[in-house]
Image (spheres, rainbow, N blue to C red):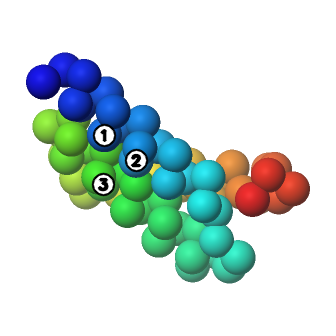
């Protein structure tokens, strides 16, 4: 069971590498990845969505060549 959680969490985090072209796409992709990760780890999906959206936007704006 623990392996499954880690595998799903890593998959969700990998989704952050698909940054998106616009600010809205970046926030939406990050929110989905964050909410999915939070649900897998039995956390609050809303908090995960906010954190994921913010993290993806910041990452994509800081390293645009990586997206």
Q: What residue is pinned by disc 1?
A: 8
> For mark 3, does the 10 Å Cα neighbourhood hold few (<14), some (14 to 19), or many (20 or more) residues?
many
- Nearer to us: label 3 or label 1: 1
Q: Secondary structure at mark 3?
A: helix
Q: What residue is pinned by disc 3?
A: 35
> Could you tell me how many numbered marks the image carries?
3
- Return the x and y of residue 37 as percentages of the image width and height: 31, 44
Residue sitting at 64 percent across and 62 percent down?
A: 19
Query: From the viewer's perspective, is 44 left or right of 56?
Result: left
Q: Earlier in the sequence, mark 3 or mark 2?
A: 2
Residue sitting at 42 percent across and 36 percent down?
A: 10
> For mark 1, does the 10 Å Cα neighbourhood hold few (<14), some (14 to 19), or many (20 or more) residues?
some
Label 3 vs label 2: CA separation?
A: 9 Å
Looking at the figure, which quarter contains the N terminus?
A: top left
Query: From the viewer's perspective, is 55 left or right of 38?
Result: right
Q: What residue is pinned by disc 2?
A: 12
* Residue 50 visible in the displayed image: no
State if disc 2 and disc 1 touch (CB < 8 Å): yes
Q: Quadrant of residue 21?
A: bottom right
């Amino acid at each position: 069971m623990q392996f499954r959680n880690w595998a799903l969490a890593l998959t969700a985090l990998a989704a952050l590498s698909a940054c998106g072209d616009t600010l809205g796409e970046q926030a939406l992709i990050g929110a989905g990845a964050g909410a999915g990760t939070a649900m897998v780890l039995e956390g609050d999906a809303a908090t995960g969505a906010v954190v994921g959206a913010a993290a993806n936007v910041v990452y994509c704006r800081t390293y645009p060549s990586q997206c």
